[in-house]
């Protein structure tokens, strides 16, 4: 301000900035305190609106509280004369002022608590008033041990559960927060769901609240945490009977042999088919916490309630090749642990966490149904990835991403969750990852795009050399039309000069590299016309191909060479299929178009770009090169060395 407009003290010295702020805030606090006690309803409402906004400022809050402002607001609430919008702004201002921690919550009167609890217990109350009342009660419980007992006398769990059935998600969230606070501060003997009771009448909760109460226990994860941290006792016959029941349901109708040794051998075989890590004593799989007994509870629920799904998953995987089977037991245990991490089971309520999942209100066994949906997703993703035992962690990472993305869409029911997950297949996850990486601002600027275009040919050449080197090592292929017990094999490899394909029959699968001398047949690369895959392969068009399953069809490829001859392949797995089709295309000078090449290209380019841009971290990369400066008017400034 100019000197003529500056405030000065009585000594003629300018006020310091902080003193001026304190003076302004004190003046505003005094004016608002007078206005909220005005006889004019309109003036009082406007003052409360302004107070609700300013109360978030700590400096103003300090001045207002020093003027006994908290007591004034409390008396306005206790009087019961404020309603609707006026009461909502009063409660907002009160909560904002108390959240600064300047005044202790223990000073709150019993009549104030009764009035706030009355708003929560009323069947028809304004949403904004109910929301603020729930928030105030939560703060009371969390900040004062004595107030917990007073609030518990006025508010029952049954009354709070009623607020979980409304459509307003904010009210549901605030109700859950208050329930969590009551559980958190309750004595140990009252934390269990079965011990909850109507505090003011000292009698059990009514039976008609049983359904909502189970939903409540799922949301608060009280019992889930207990089961998650309970280890299985291998000597507990009741717990072992659950595992026997899982086996019986999966392999129903099979009579146990009479001999002890035969029964033990059969049980071991069945437990292996069920996917347990410990085939002899599966109870040892549940001795780690988390997930403890919670995983076994989930498996038993799936087996009993969704029996067809359970049997299909077990039998489907037990009929696959050993390396491609999805171990149900191990998957269920790891999935339970993952779900606990995603939903933060066992962790204390966090004020900064706003995650809310409305689907848990739609089913009385929402947690178990959630597990059943996710275990089917895991089995489906395992098949889509053509995973083996070595890929277990990779599959779990993809499944975690699928579940996390689906939950982020806030499905309102279990059925909606299924629909969301149905659209998040493994190929869709790969597409989303690629899209998100490409949509980053740093990777869309012209200099970065130009750098990527320059790097790409080098990376493609590197991938090409890797594929050709792999062809030079060679691979073993199974001959079609043979039963597994009488399998015959043949081996194919590329010469070191990349000019000839050598191949020949083998009696058994080789353990290492096969020398060229043992491969009697050969095809010059110059004679190769083309490479075809899938249904276009000659050996897939024959009558016997009708008997081939989809897996064989996806792994088939053929080399067409002069004069109208073919060399037919069925790769042992997807990786070998990509390696050989890419390598043969590279030999013919064609583009390598497999999923493996796209994945390798994306990974290697991303790594190379990050390495090259490492020194430019936190430096803004310009969109265009800097302009070339104008030439100087003369070059007289140059030094003449002569």
Image (cartoon, rainbow, N blue to C red):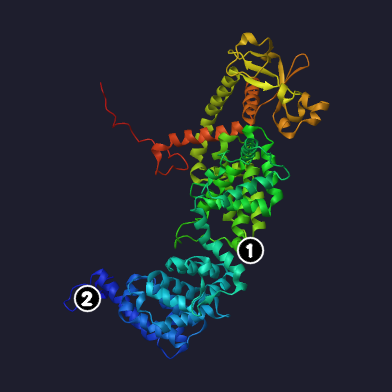
> Can the viewer see residue 549 in this picture?
yes
Mark 2 in CB contact with mark 1 (< 8 angstroms): no
The percent position of residue 226, horizontal first and vertical second, equals 50, 57
Q: Is residue 38 above or below residue 18?
A: below
Marks 2 and 1, how far apart at CA: 66 Å
Q: Which mark is residue 362?
A: 1
Which residue is located at x 75 percent, y 18 percent? 566
Q: Which of marks 2 and 1 is in front?
A: 1
Q: In the image, which disc is placed on residue 532? A: none
In which quadrant of the rendered image does the N terminus lie? bottom left
Q: Mark yes or no: residue 410 visible.
A: no
> For this view, does 233 lie left or right of residue 109?
right
Q: Residue most toward the left?
A: 11
Q: Nearer the viewer, residue 169 or 448?
A: 169
**Mark 1 closeness class: few <14, some 14–19, many ≥20 residues within 10 Å:** some
Residue visible at 29% across and 31% down?
636
Q: Can you say whether 189 is above or below 420 in the image?
A: below
Residue 40 pos. (x, y %): 45, 90
- The image shows residue 541 at horizontal and vertical percentages of 80, 27
Judging from the image, what secondary structure is the residue with disc 1 in? loop
Q: What element carries label 2?
A: loop
Q: In this view, does 581 lie above or below 506?
A: below
Crowding near the residue tagged with mark 2, few <14, some 14–19, many ≥20 C-alpha atoms within 10 Å: few
The image shows residue 240, relative to residue 210, as above or below, that is above
Return the residue at label 2.
8
Which is nearer the N-term, disc 2 or disc 1?
Answer: 2
Residue found 68% across the figure and 48% down from its top: 249
Residue 438: x and y in percent read 55, 42
Towards the viewer: 422 or 46: 422
Q: Quadrant of the C terminus?
A: top left
């Amino acid at each position: 301000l100019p000197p003529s407009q500056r405030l000065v003290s009585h000594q003629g010295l300018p006020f310091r900035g902080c003193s001026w702020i304190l003076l302004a805030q004190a003046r505003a606090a005094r004016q608002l305190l007078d206005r909220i006690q005005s006889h004019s309803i309109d003036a009082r409402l406007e003052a409360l609106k302004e107070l609700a906004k300013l109360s978030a400022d700590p400096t103003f809050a300090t001045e207002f509280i020093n003027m006994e402002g908290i007591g004034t607001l409390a008396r306005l609430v206790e009087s019961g004369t404020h309603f609707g919008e006026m009461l909502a702004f009063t409660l907002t201002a009160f909560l904002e002022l108390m959240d600064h921690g300047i005044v202790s919550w223990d000073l709150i009167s019993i009549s104030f608590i009764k009035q706030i609890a009355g708003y929560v217990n009323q069947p028809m109350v304004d949403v904004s008033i109910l929301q603020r009342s729930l928030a105030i009660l939560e703060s009371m419980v969390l900040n004062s041990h004595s107030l917990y007992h007073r609030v518990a006398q006025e508010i029952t769990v049954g009354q709070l559960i009623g607020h979980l059935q409304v459509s307003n998600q904010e009210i549901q969230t605030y109700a859950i927060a208050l329930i969590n606070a009551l559980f958190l501060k309750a004595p140990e003997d009252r934390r269990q769901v079965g011990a909850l009771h109507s505090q003011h009448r000292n009698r059990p909760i009514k039976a008609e609240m049983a359904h909502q109460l189970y939903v409540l226990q799922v949301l608060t994860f009280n019992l889930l945490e207990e089961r998650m941290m309970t280890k299985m006792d291998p000597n507990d016959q009741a717990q072992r009977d659950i595992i026997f029941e899982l086996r019986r349901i999966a392999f129903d109708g099979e009579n146990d042999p009479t001999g002890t040794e035969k029964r033990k051998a059969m049980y071991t075989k069945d437990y292996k088919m069920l996917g347990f890590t410990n085939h002899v004593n599966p109870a040892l799989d549940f001795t780690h916490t988390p997930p403890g007994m919670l995983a076994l509870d989930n498996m038993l629920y799936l087996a009993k309630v969704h029996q067809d799904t359970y049997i299909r998953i077990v039998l489907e995987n037990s009929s696959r090749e050993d390396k491609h089977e999805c171990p149900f037991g191990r998957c269920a245990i790891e999935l339970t642990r993952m779900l606990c991490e995603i939903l933060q089971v066992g962790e204390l309520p966090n004020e900064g966490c706003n995650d809310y999942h409305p689907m848990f209100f739609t089913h009385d066994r929402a947690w178990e149904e959630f597990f059943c949906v996710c275990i089917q997703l895991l089995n489906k993703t395992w098949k889509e990835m053509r995973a083996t035992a070595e890929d277990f962690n990779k599959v779990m990472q993809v499944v975690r991403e699928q579940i996390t993305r689906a939950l982020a869409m806030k499905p309102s029911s279990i059925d909606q969750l299924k629909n969301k997950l149905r659209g998040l297949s493994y190929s869709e996850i790969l597409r989303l990852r690629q899209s998100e990486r490409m949509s980053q601002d740093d990777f869309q600027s012209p200099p970065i795009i130009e750098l990527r275009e320059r790097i790409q040919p080098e990376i493609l050449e590197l991938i090409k050399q890797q594929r050709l080197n792999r062809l030079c090592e060679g691979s073993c292929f199974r001959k079609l039309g043979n039963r597994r017990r009488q399998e015959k094999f043949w081996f194919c490899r590329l010469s070191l000069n990349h000019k000839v394909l050598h191949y020949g029959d083998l009696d058994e699968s080789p353990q290492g590299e096969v020398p060229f001398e043992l491969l009697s047949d050969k095809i010059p690369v110059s004679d190769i016309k083309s490479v075809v895959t899938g249904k276009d392969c000659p050996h897939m068009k024959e009558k016997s191909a009708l008997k081939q399953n989809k897996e064989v069809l996806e792994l088939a490829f053929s080399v067409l060479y002069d004069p109208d001859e073919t060399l037919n392949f069925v790769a042992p797995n997807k990786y070998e299929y990509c390696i050989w089709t890419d390598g043969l295309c590279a030999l013919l000078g064609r583009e390598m178009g497999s999923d493996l090449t796209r994945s390798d290209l994306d990974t290697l380019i991303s790594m190379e770009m990050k390495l090259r841009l490492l020194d430019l971290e936190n430096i803004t990369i310009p969109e265009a090169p800097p302009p070339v400066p104008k030439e100087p008017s003369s070059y007289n400034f140059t030094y003449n060395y002569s």
